[in-house]
Amino acid sequence: MNSIYREKEEQEVSYSLGKTMEFDSFLPLLLLVFSCCCLPVLPCQNCVEVGKSITGNQKLISSDRSFALGFFIPSNSMYTYLGIWYNIIPQQTVVWVANRESPIPSNASPVFTVGGDGNLVIFDEKGELIWSSNVSSTSREPLLTSNSTIGILLDTGNLVLRYYGESNYLWQSFQHPTDTLLRHMRFGFNKISGLRNVITSWTSNEDPQPGNFSFGIDRVMRFVIWNQNDIYYRFDDGCRAYILATVWCFTVVTENDNVYLNLAYYRIFLRLRVVLNPSGQLQVMVWNKNKSNKWNVEFEAPRSKCELYAHCGPFGTCGIRSKGLCSCLDGFEPKFSTDWANEIWNGGCVRKIALGCDGGDGFFKHENMKLPDYAVSLGNMSTEECETQCIRNCSCSAYACTRNACFIWHGDLLDIGHDITNGRTLYVRVHNSEQVTNAQSRNSARRYKILIAKIVSASFAILLLISISAFIFKRKRLRRRGESSISKLDGDSALVSSMPSGSLVGKDDMKLVQYSLQNIRDATNNFHEENKLGEGGFGPVFKGSLPEFGDVAIKRLSRKSSQGLEEFMNELKLIANLQHKNLVSLLGCCVEGEEKILIYEYMPNCSLDKFLSDPSLKVTLGWDTRFGIIEGIAQGMLYLHKYSRLKVIHRDLKVSNILLDQEMIPKISDFGMARIFGTDQTQASTKRVVGTYGYMSPEYVVYGQFSEKSDVFSFGVLLLEILTGERNSDFFTTEVCVSLLGWAWKMWKEGRMLELIDPSIRAICDSNKAARSVLVSLLCVQEVPTDRPTMSDIVVMLSNETTPIPEPKEPAFRSSWRHQTSSDFSINELTLTLPVPR
């Protein structure tokens, strides 16, 4: 029995050993297959896919960090919703809600993911479906499955569903808006089916469920707010003209059978949204982070009950010569006088005398009017021709001419109002006898007004004569004092640039607010030393406060500076034409006598230089903050080189010229040394080399040649300083015989790139991004300009981890400059700025 057992045991051991040896032989192959299978499912920060879900406090972040998606609970609410909100604004502002019609109890644990049918879905803790994007496959499309689709939160705030590897969207949140319109979002109706999509208000400020109000475009191309199914407010043509004249606008786009309303605005650096609030008001809101740190309402409608649709009924108008809310047009009277006495207006007005329709009817002229609804266009014609067309038609009640286009109205006139800002002239048809009676009643009033006008005119003439005399006397005194400074300013304002000087200033330039010197003195407490933020080659910078902007930075041209006036004029004319979220905003200026002052938005965190120079502050710069600063600077430089109205070479990019706002967003500043290039220009030369020690490219130092690639070189040095926490200039003053660039090159050659990273963040940094960033910096500081990448290439390499990065060549200035001989330099005039923390 024991022998049988032993034999069986030996067989089992032999079998086990055989299996083990067989498994060991396949182990490398299995590991290879497993690693290959894992490669495609690496998580991304802005996407959700099979196997990746969002729950609890987790969230998706768009690649530029502008928007976030996750679950939220409104204040004083017992329910949870999946929504999208602004990520970098401290006040949570939700712009889209997925399950607004299916709220989830706040004590539940919902999950957002890609479902088994390939749709974006929300499940509750029991696995029951709460919400779905509800996309169905068609015969023209591949089968929709869980492993074929991916959900992505775009930088625009749009949540999209698409197939892997394809760019077309299967579904997008922009086509299913809630109460908010964002840039590039469009919605409208189908001309064939009549189906429309609209934005719908929340029930209350604390309840995202659909409310009573909606906004959209109807079949006759009107911008309308509805209260359930009834028109609540109508945007007339005058209001639409006002909208189009601002920095934002609605545009109507027609594609095949679809008509869309599209939101656009011209200053892309603005954080702007259009929201329909629970009270039925459409509001255009802009985030003001500089002054109030809140959403400012730039436009809203309706603003009062007087503006509600047809509030005063037919032929009734709001707020004109009435003690109450509504009144009748001239030649009309209340239809139900008892109702009007009780302020029940919707019955409207009727004619006192019926129209004769015998060619003897006339028209009352009403100015500054919101034009009635249901206009009929007759095309281009003069006012006289338009009146003739109306007289010939017995049913014509009124006419108006706008931009030589004739509009007439038939039957009752609805939704009329008095609009001083954008109103038009409306001619309302009445019986001829009404005109005679009205003319007689107005004659006596006219005579009284003429008498008053004569008295006022005489008094005004006397005051005007006194004022002119005083003005002439004062002007003679000021002319003697101001002629010398004005002529000096005009003479010195010619810029040394690569384009004609006239191209800098034109009718399209942004107009700046100009302040008196006394305003500036008041704002800075007479340039008190306690308000001084720092000082550069231009002159001192002070903190001040102005009523229009709140805290500001005031840059004062030093009278001791021999080269400051040219830089002042250059910066004034140049930065006024540049608008980007990563460029400092110029708010105003002061040019008075010998004083030359620029006024900028205030940066509470001062410069990046302050953080890198102070060990106690440097440790507060985490990896995400540093990489965000790097990306922001790259985007700002890309705008200067490629996307701005003027192609700009900065020439002085350095850490002290990178300012940080309250949210640590970088702003490129100091354009005093910048130069403008023509569209096709790639290089320019100067005999006056200006710049900062350690940041200037070799071709600029030696030959005075500058281009986009010289800015790229400076960016590479700046990038290394942010990654290492070291200053390039510090290496020139140590006993080490290599520069920061040489040290980076040495560490890369030895395969020790991560040792370059600042020790305070080395353990928590994204090692892949850090290594790529070091490689990008080495590409930027290569000696030959043509070897360096463009800013477009840099942005792609930093933002896309799959983009291949070529091997860099040896950098310029690998050894310390103190070992260079004087023969290495040209005879160009060289002006260097030594970097000093500020």
Image: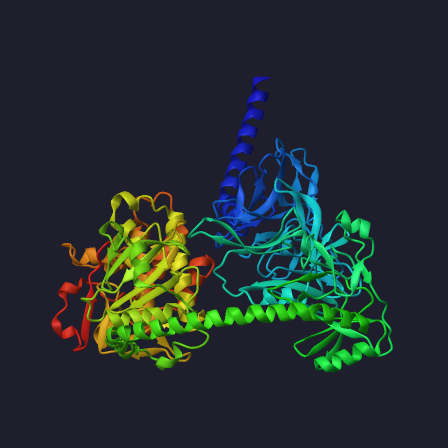
The image quadrant where one finds the N terminus is top right
- In the image, what residue occupies the spot 72% across and 55% down? 326
Q: 398 above or below 350?
A: below
Q: 99 above or below 549?
A: above
230 vs 620, left or right, is: right
Residue most extreme to the top: 1
200 vs 165, left or right, is: right
574 vs 350, left or right, is: left
**Colour logic:** rainbow
- In the image, what residue occupies the spot 38% across and 63% down? 586
Taking depth in this image into account, of 555 and 124 the one nearest to the observer is 555
Taking depth in this image into account, of 400 and 510 the one nearest to the observer is 400
Instruction: Estimate the x, y position of residue 457 in percent, counting from the top left.
Output: 50, 72
Do we see residue 78 in this rendering? Answer: yes
Instruction: Estimate the x, y position of residue 3 in percent, counting from the top left.
Output: 56, 20
Number of numbered tags placed on the structure image = 0
The image quadrant where one finds the C terminus is bottom left
Do we see residue 804 in this rendering? Answer: no
Instruction: Estimate the x, y position of residue 137 in percent, counting from the top left.
Output: 73, 55
Which quarter of the picture shows residue 641?
bottom left
